[in-house]
Image: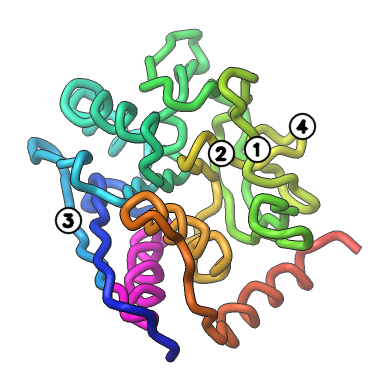
Amino acid sequence: MSKTSNRTLTLIHLYPDLLNLYGDRGNIITLRRRCEWRGITLQVHSASLGEKAAFDDADLVFMGGGSDREQTLLFQDFQQHKGPALVEAAEGGLPLLSVCGGYQLLGLYYRTHTGEEMPGLGLFDAWTEAGSTRLIGNVVAQAPLLGEQATLVGFENHSGRTFLGSRGGIQPLAQVTAGFGNNGDDQGEGAVYKNAVGTYLHGPVLPKNPALADWLLSKALERRYGGGSLSTLQDTWENRAHLSVAQRFGKK
């Protein structure tokens, strides 16, 4: 593998014991390997209930998805102890990947079937409303953020319908060509705000989407070292996995 000069990044993995639906922890493995192949050291620190998270010293943050039960368990801890500092760091450009439940918690609120609203952290100008059915299946989406012809693939399974506002230049991460995305209506999938990314894509998302992994790493390197250049990797198997989903489930 091609390597660059020795650099070190620090990643904080939030609630790894509670938020790991559909192998979301595989995103950490992907980031670690893609750093290793380039001679970059990725230090991973976990922070769960009652544990401190030093976002001021971090270069990346990952927060996966969980069931309603897990999200309820961590809600108070996240709101009171980790969330506000995370939002402050993300506003300052800290790269962040949040998946499904993690994505929802970083929005403005989640409205239940009965009309109750659970407040979010408000990093994303987005809100989620409970739906009567689940949005399930494979997703193929166009992602110009990652390149002119770039696509994202993954698996979604969520009942919440997320809608994006317009504050601060928030944008969808991608536009679905197959699947449901944020809400099944507007074709948007996920969100991007500054260097923070939210998505409904499990699978996990990064092994089959190396361009997104490298986008996050590049932003982290740029913020830490003033330059985000990454040596090119062959990505033979990653691209095969990506194309197998895109060709099988993408609309003709």
Q: Earlier in the sequence, mark 4 or mark 3?
A: 3
* Quarter of image, res 236: bottom right
Mark 1 to mark 2: distance in Å? 6 Å
Q: Residue at x 16, y 46 (%)?
A: 47
In the rendered structure, find residue 136 and report the number of the disc placed on it: none
Q: Which residue is mark 2?
A: 192
Stretch of the chain drawn in magenta: 22-40
Q: Residue at x 19, y 46 (%)?
A: 57
Residue type, mark 3 in image: His
Q: Which residue is mark 1?
A: 172
Q: Is residue 168 above or below residue 48?
A: above
Mark 4 to mark 2: distance in Å? 16 Å
The secondary element bearing badge 2 is classed as strand
Q: Which residue is mark 4?
A: 186
Query: Which percent across, then down, holds residue 60?
Result: 33, 51
Q: Residue at x 45, y 61 (%)?
A: 228
Residues marked 1 and 2 touching at CB (< 8 Å): yes
Residues marked 2 and 3 touching at CB (< 8 Å): no
**Quadrant position of the N terminus in the picture:** bottom left
Pick the front one: 144 or 246: 144
